[in-house]
Every structure is written in C-alpha cells, then in structure tokens.
Amino acid sequence: MTTTSRVAMLRELRPPAERPFVLEEVAIPPLTEGAVLGRMVLAGVCGTDVHILHGKVPIKLPAILGHENVCQVVEIGGSKPLADITGQPVQVGDLITWLPKSCMQCYSCTILKDQSKCERRIGYGGWLPAWQHPYLVGGFAEYVWLLPGSDIVVVNDVAPEAVVLGDALRVMVHAVENVGGICYGDTVVVQGSGAVGMMGILLALDAGAGQVIVTGGPAARLDLVRELGADVAIDIFGVRAPERIAQVLELTHGRGADVIIEATGVPTAVAEGLEMVRINGRYVIAGHYGDAGTVPLNPHLINRKQVTITGAWSADNSHFLRGLTLLRKLSRETLDKLVRPRFSLTDINAALLATERQETVKVVVAP
Ligand SMILES: [Zn+2]
Ligand SMILES: [Zn+2]
C-alpha cells in the first residue's frame, strides 16, 4: 500500500513563468470512517488557478490547487456503505468527482436555500489548508484524501475529459437558470470564449437557441467556437465594440438578442452587452469572480429596454448534476478539441503557463 503521495505544493504566490509549484512527497493519513482515498486520474487547470497565482483570488498557503478533478477510488475508510449525492453506491475502483461542500447550516444554506452562497463552503484545490489534516486537499497531486461526508458524484459513465469541464458548465447551468432559461429559437449572445463561455455556447445550442453569437478571441478559439456550432463568432481583437454591437443588431433585425451571457470578467463587456440586448431582454453576468473594477453604464438603457439583469455565483450540486446531461453527449472529437494539452504532474508549471497564455480551452494534468 502506498504511504505517500506526490503533490504539486504551492508555498509562495508567483506567476506561472516563475515556476511557483514544487513537487513534494506528503504522507497519506490513515482513512477514518467514510473518508475516501482517490488516485487522481485527471485535473483541469482553471482560470481561477491563474488568478490565485497572481494574488487575485485569496487563499492561504501552503496550498495544493486543482479543483476540477476526477479520481479513482482506491480505499474507503471504515466498513459502512458509502453513497454519492444521488444515492448511488461508491465502491473501490469507481471514477468519482466531488463538489464544493456547503454546510447546510448557515443563513445562505438554510434561509436563502442557496448552497452556492454558503458562508462556510469547503473547497478542495486551494480553499482547504494543505498544512493540516487531511493534507491531500487538491487535485494537482497523485492522491487525494476526501473528508467523510464529501459531496461525491460517481462518474463511471462520463469521460474524465468531460467531467473536468463540469466546473465551468455548472456555472453556466446556474447562469441560464438565473436568467430565466433559454427559450426555443432564442438568439443568445455569449460574451467570452474561455472554458465558461464555451460551455455557455454548448448549453445554449443544446437548449434550442435559434442563433448563437459569440464575442471573444483569439482567432484560434473562435475557429473552435464555430466548430462547436455557434452561428457567428466576432473577434474582439479585430472588431471594435461599436461594430460588434452593430453586428449583433444586424443579426437580430435591429432588435437585439433575447439573452446575453457574460463570461469575460471584463467590466466593459457589461456596458457593451447592454447595447446588444433587446427590449425586455435578459442579461446574466457570470464572469466576474474576481473584482475587475467598475465601468460606466447607461442606466437609461436598462430603464428604456426594461432589461432584466442578474448574476450567477458558482453553482450548487443540482447545477452540476444537470450539467452531466450535456457532458455525456460530448463526442470524443469535441472533447479532443476542448480538453488539451495534457501535462504530467512533473510539468505542472508549464500547464499553468499554457492556461495563462490561453493557448487552449482546458489544459489538464494527469499524475
Ligand atoms: Zn474552475
Ligand atoms: Zn452554508
């Protein structure tokens, strides 16, 4: 039985180019009743990880990052049967992922009934401290040690490459829900062509959108956007904002889009989106996890067009479970385009650098 795990330890915040991760061996603590030891199969690298390295998302050090995870169950603590959040048994050999754990006791969990705003959420991959038990608290590692009561989902029937997209997709499921859904035939504008934006495109198409228009970049990503089925992809590096707005209006008989999904994290995109939305249209802001500052907005647009504006913060377990419907449908060809390249744990710093450079949509790490 293995007694130690290799981990990519983050002891100091530095940009990816300065190689912030150091490989270390960490002792695997004995399992307690209901705890799970998993061997990592695949971990997605998230834009959030890059933000963490730049100090824009606060975490405590030392930390083990990696929150988009698939592992194989190696051992389960104790003798009681274990089930995932849907009631399905969890057994040794299963492929599983696990979701941020909400306390179900705080004001947000009990009164607001909103797990995604839990005040005491437990998240692997940076939010649980790596200097105390159970130590193996992130996916950029050989093994993970899941606390008893973790929100596990058995994913034997989903490709690991699809599961790691579930982190971005669950946010989009939440966003579409908050904005009141997508009606069959709707014109949807997705602002942003990162992993979250890509999931927004796939979700809008799957929900029956009549026309999906994407504003994003760089060009290679927009080629992919078109291959995924978007009707129009507008390059933000080649087309200025007034022309982008004009194009959306032209594509919608001068009326504007029914639904706009913001997935950029760029404040000016919000002002732009308000120009693109139709009368009585709906707008959801989902790309601003970091505080990127303010932007001048024209309230007259909101007033005159009666725009419904909402936000979506992270997601709850139901959003992930519903997202699995789409993840199961993704073809191998699509997954190969979205999820690449694959790095070994030894090359973790290069994986973060590739993510920072936005060379592809979802970089992954396999131990
Ligand atoms: Zn993520
Ligand atoms: Zn809570």
Image (cartoon, rainbow, N blue to C red):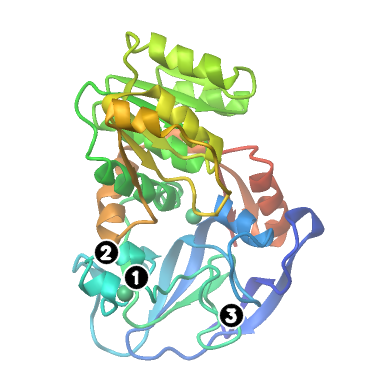
Q: Amino acid at mark 2?
A: Asp
Q: Nearer the viewer, residue 141 or 66?
A: 66
* Rendered position, 8 above or below 211: below
Residue occupied by mark 1: 118
Residue 114's mark? Answer: 2
Q: Amino acid at mark 3?
A: Ala
- Can residue 205 be seen from the camera position used here? no
- Can residue 270 be seen from the camera position used here? yes
Q: CA distance from mark 1 to mark 3?
A: 21 Å
**Ligand 2 has an atom within 8 Å of the beta carbon of the residue at disc 1:** yes
Q: CA distance from mark 2 to mark 1?
A: 7 Å
Which quarter of the figure is the C terminus placed in? bottom right
* Rendered position, 253 above or below 125: above
Pointer 2 with pointer 1, Cβ within 8 A? yes
Q: Amino acid at mark 1?
A: Cys
Picture residue at 72% right of the left edge, 57% below the top: 349
In terms of sequence position, does the residue under pointer 2 or pointer 3 come before the other? 2
- The label nearer to you, 2 versus 3, is 2
Residue 144: x and y, percent? 50, 74
